[in-house]
Image (cartoon, rainbow, N blue to C red):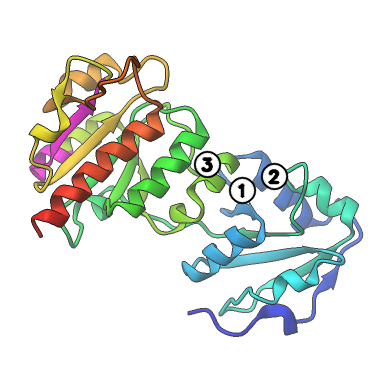
Amino acid sequence: MPTASIRTRLPRIVQSRQNTRVKELRAGFARASGTEEGHIAIEGEHLLLEAATSGLRFAAVFIRAGSEHLLDKLSISEVVEILTLPPDIFASAVSTESPQGVAALVEPPAFALEDVLRAKTTPLLLIAAALQDPGNLGTLIRSAEAFGATGLITLPGTVSPWNQKALRASAGSVFRLPVVAAREDEVFSALQSHNIATLAAVAAEGESLTQHDLNRPTALILGNEGSGIPAEILRRATHRVTVPMPGPVESLNAAIAGSILLYEASRQRAANP
């Protein structure tokens, strides 16, 4: 559990861009898959606070010289390395054009497919099939946590949840919601063995979402922003559903559509606890 502020710990001043930790931080921001050491890079007071309160393990914290006050609210139970960097070196290592002054290398949470299938509550899953916009994925992760989903599965071709834009859009939910990458055959075989219904979201000609009982174990499938759900995945789905839209709009943004699906599931489950 988080303890006292790390502000009281003595930071190490680093003056070189070639410092091993600085190079790893730079690599972490450049690679969505994480560093060779198994860490992901995060930036900004909010994300660091979310990571700390979510119980993630910190490998190192980086503070821009002059921004030490940002450490006041950051409470981490284990002893971590704190490095103070001159503004130019800090800016060279992070990904944003206007750095917030604090960054970190953390160990991402590790979840397996069974973790999202064997939930303590009735499973409600979101499956991203070739979703490529990181902002959409991050928003869906945040909505999934907000509306009580038990996990999110990314199929091949989907952007990494550790992409920096996805991380920021999730606002920290990615640190807590089980997010798992898996192959199609593995996923659908597991869904069938757990008797989880699969509802594929299509822009038109699907059944109305409100006609389905979402109190049962359910997986909601969302596809690519442009081409939708791949045909081979559509064939595997139990049903095809469409969000009713009285207005003259062809389709919804993937994050908005997924959030509406999740809200309807949450609404039904709240009405029938």
Q: CA distance from mark 1 to mark 3?
A: 20 Å
Residue 17 shown left or right of residue 223 in the figure: right
Q: Few, some or many C-alpha atoms within 10 Å of disc 1 (few <14, some 14-19, many ≥20)?
A: few
Q: What residue is rendered at 53% in x and 63% in y?
A: 51
Q: Is residue 193 magenta?
A: yes
Which quadrant is the C terminus positioned in? bottom left
Q: Amino acid at mark 1?
A: Glu
Q: What residue is rendered at 68% in x and 65% in y?
A: 60
Q: Few, some or many C-alpha atoms within 10 Å of disc 2 (few <14, some 14-19, many ≥20)?
A: some
Q: Is residue 132 magenta?
A: no
Residue 241 shown left or right of residue 132 in the figure: left
Secondary structure under badge 3?
A: helix
Residue that mark 1 sits on: 36
Eye-nearest disc, 2 or 1: 2
State which quadrant residue 233 falls in: top left
Closer to the chain start, of discs 3 and 2, is 2
Q: Amino acid at mark 3?
A: Ala
User: Which numbered dot is residue 166?
Assistant: 3
The magenta stretch is 190-202
Q: What residue is rendered at 51% in x and 36% in y?
A: 135
In the image, 102 versus 211, the foreground residue is: 211
